Image (spheres, rainbow, N blue to C red):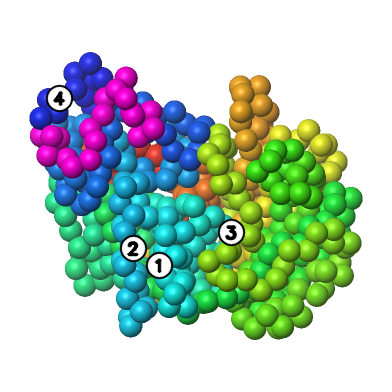
């Protein structure tokens, strides 16, 4: 790796159409800062790519100078500080082209799901986005992409038809099942280990509207709602998608009344079928405990941020997750002991959730990929906000206690997008099965033998 005081000559980067910035220069901080403020990026060079040619130029320079490379679009997954090296910011590459005849969208590297929704909605189409449409499409999809409607339609990676990708040797390649099939495999679930995607083509679904939202109960009804939800998940059809969450919401203006500053138990619902049928399915939950706030209703697909109501402003977050084999009564007891009302009003985790998996999420993709979460029946995730060091330490301790306590019910694996700060090789490997991890390491050795793409949730070459 090139030492920060020995940065190679930047003349070759003068061909980049976007800005090329060094520490201390105006606009450098804005260029390197992502949505998750928990990680401070300090690359030796940052470029604002405007198109595939800029990415090719940057990667060829990095390859020639042996400079490690990171890529960032929105920075929602910025859980690892990028120090030294080159950071390629793709946030200017937001073009989305929808073909209503083939029901596909060609999506550039920096586009958010909100861009895709806006482009697809006039045709009654939608993509398989996650809990926030503010997140970037490409990074989310490279990690498999766990959609709000996943039980109904599977992973976002399952719908990808092709990628345009710049590999670490500086070549722009097209990867699909017929051309570069191994590269195509590794890009769907293997995160950004074998190249920098400049665009992808994905299928869209005819989903103009859906029935969804959140049922909110006060703290004292947490246990009743959770136990009812768990039993309910054993009876619902595959198309019913849901998540149970414990929320400790701060008293800030970004959170609407009456939820602001409260402790809530919530079940978030997403049903793509007939609203009347969805309402009938949800009725047992409405009767399980007193619902203080009922926001479940029919809505446009483009409005699905209303389901989970995730933060829209940058913040310092500590994410973590665990795939669960099942959710027996003792697992429910453990979860409640750790994060329920008994943990206290000052418990430091903002949200702790249990998502219902299965359905289409358990079925294999039509074309083999690197997604390794299809055997999980439930999925646990948590988020803590870390505005200052003492709070950050409390969040870290609470996170460790929760996942240690729930480990007996886990598969031993995580999902790469929500894994949190990656540790050593053994920790990073938990996002995949041993067989898939070994295959990714082999592909890394083929496409990135010098390990230029070493930041974030990277695997080491075999």
| Residue hosting label 4 | 8
Q: Which residue, as the protein is rendered here, is positioned at the far top?
A: 5
In depth, the one of 270 and 327 nearer the eye is 270
| Residue hosting label 1 | 119
Please give the name of the residue rendered at 35% of the width and 34% of the height, measured from the top-left corner.
31
Which one is earlier in the sequence, the residue at label 1 or at label 4?
4
Which one is earlier in the sequence, the residue at label 2 or at label 4?
4
Q: Position of residue 189 (x, y in %)?
A: 40, 57
Rate crowding at label 1 as few (under 14), some (14 to 19) or many (20 or more) other CA atoms within 10 Å: some
Residue 339 seen by the camera: no
Rate crowding at label 2 as few (under 14), some (14 to 19) or many (20 or more) other CA atoms within 10 Å: many
Q: Tell me which segment is drawn in magenta.
A: 12-31
Q: Quadrant of residue 227?
A: bottom right
Q: Position of residue 312 (x, y in %)?
A: 56, 47
The label nearer to you, 3 versus 1, is 1
Left/right placement of residue 253 relative to residue 417 reads right
The label nearer to you, 1 versus 4, is 1
Left/right placement of residue 389 relative to residue 2 reads right
Q: Is residue 371 above or below residue 240?
A: above
Q: Are marks 2 and 1 in contact (CB under 8 Å)?
A: yes
| Residue hosting label 3 | 305
Q: Is residue 15 within the magenta segment?
A: yes
| Residue hosting label 2 | 96
Report how far apart the C-alphas of labels 2 and 3 lie in the structure: 20 Å
In depth, the one of 282 and 310 nearer the eye is 310
The label nearer to you, 2 versus 4, is 2
Quarter that holds the N terminus: top left
Q: Position of residue 439 (x, y in %)?
A: 32, 55
Report how far apart the C-alphas of labels 3 and 1 lie in the structure: 16 Å
Rate crowding at label 4 as few (under 14), some (14 to 19) or many (20 or more) other CA atoms within 10 Å: some
């Amino acid at each position: 790796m090139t030492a920060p005081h020995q940065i190679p000559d930047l003349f070759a980067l003068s061909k980049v159409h976007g800005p090329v910035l060094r520490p201390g220069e105006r606009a450098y901080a804005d260029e390197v800062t992502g949505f998750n403020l928990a990680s401070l990026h300090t690359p030796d060079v940052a470029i604002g790519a405007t198109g595939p040619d800029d990415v090719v130029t940057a990667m060829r320079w990095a390859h020639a100078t042996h400079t490690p490379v990171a890529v960032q679009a929105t920075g929602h997954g910025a859980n690892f500080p990028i120090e030294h090296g080159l950071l390629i910011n793709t946030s200017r590459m937001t073009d989305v082209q929808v073909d209503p005849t083939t029901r596909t969208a060609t999506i550039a590297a920096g586009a958010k799901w909100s861009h895709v929704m806006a482009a697809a909605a006039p045709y009654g189409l939608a993509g398989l986005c996650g809990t926030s449409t503010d997140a970037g499409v490409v990074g989310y999809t490279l990690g498999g992409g766990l959609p709000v409607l996943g039980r109904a339609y599977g992973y976002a990676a399952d719908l990808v038809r092709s990628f345009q990708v710049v590999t670490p040797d500086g070549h722009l390649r097209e990867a699909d099942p017929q051309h570069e099939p191994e590269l195509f495999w590794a890009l769907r679930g293997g995160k950004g280990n074998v190249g920098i995607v400049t665009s992808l083509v994905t299928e869209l679904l005819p989903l103009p509207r859906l029935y969804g939202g959140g049922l909110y109960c006060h703290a004292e009804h947490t246990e009743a709602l959770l136990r009812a939800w768990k039993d309910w998940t054993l009876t619902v059809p595959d198309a019913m998608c849901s998540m149970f969450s414990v929320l400790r919401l701060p008293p800030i203006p970004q959170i609407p009344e009456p939820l602001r500053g409260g402790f809530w138990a919530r079940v978030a619902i997403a049903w793509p079928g007939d609203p009347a049928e969805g309402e009938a399915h949800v009725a047992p939950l409405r009767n399980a405990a007193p619902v203080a706030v009922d926001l479940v209703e029919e809505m446009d697909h483009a409005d699905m941020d209303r389901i989970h109501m995730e933060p829209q402003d940058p913040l310092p977050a500590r994410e973590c997750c665990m795939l669960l084999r099942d959710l027996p009564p003792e697992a429910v007891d453990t979860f409640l002991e750790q994060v329920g009302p008994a943990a206290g009003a000052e418990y430091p985790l903002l949200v702790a959730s249990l998502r219902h998996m299965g359905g289409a999420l358990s079925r294999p993709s039509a074309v083999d990929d690197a997604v390794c979460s299809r055997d999980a029946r439930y999925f646990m995730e948590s988020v803590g906000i870390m505005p200052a060091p003492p709070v950050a330490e409390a969040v870290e301790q609470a996170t460790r206690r929760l996942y240690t306590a729930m480990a007996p019910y886990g598969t031993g694996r995580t999902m790469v997008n929500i894994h949190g700060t990656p540790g050593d090789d053994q920790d990073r490997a938990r996002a995949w099965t041993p067989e898939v991890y070994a295959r990714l390491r082999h592909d890394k050795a083929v496409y990135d033998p010098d390990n230029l793409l070493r930041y974030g949730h990277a695997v080491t070459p075999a």
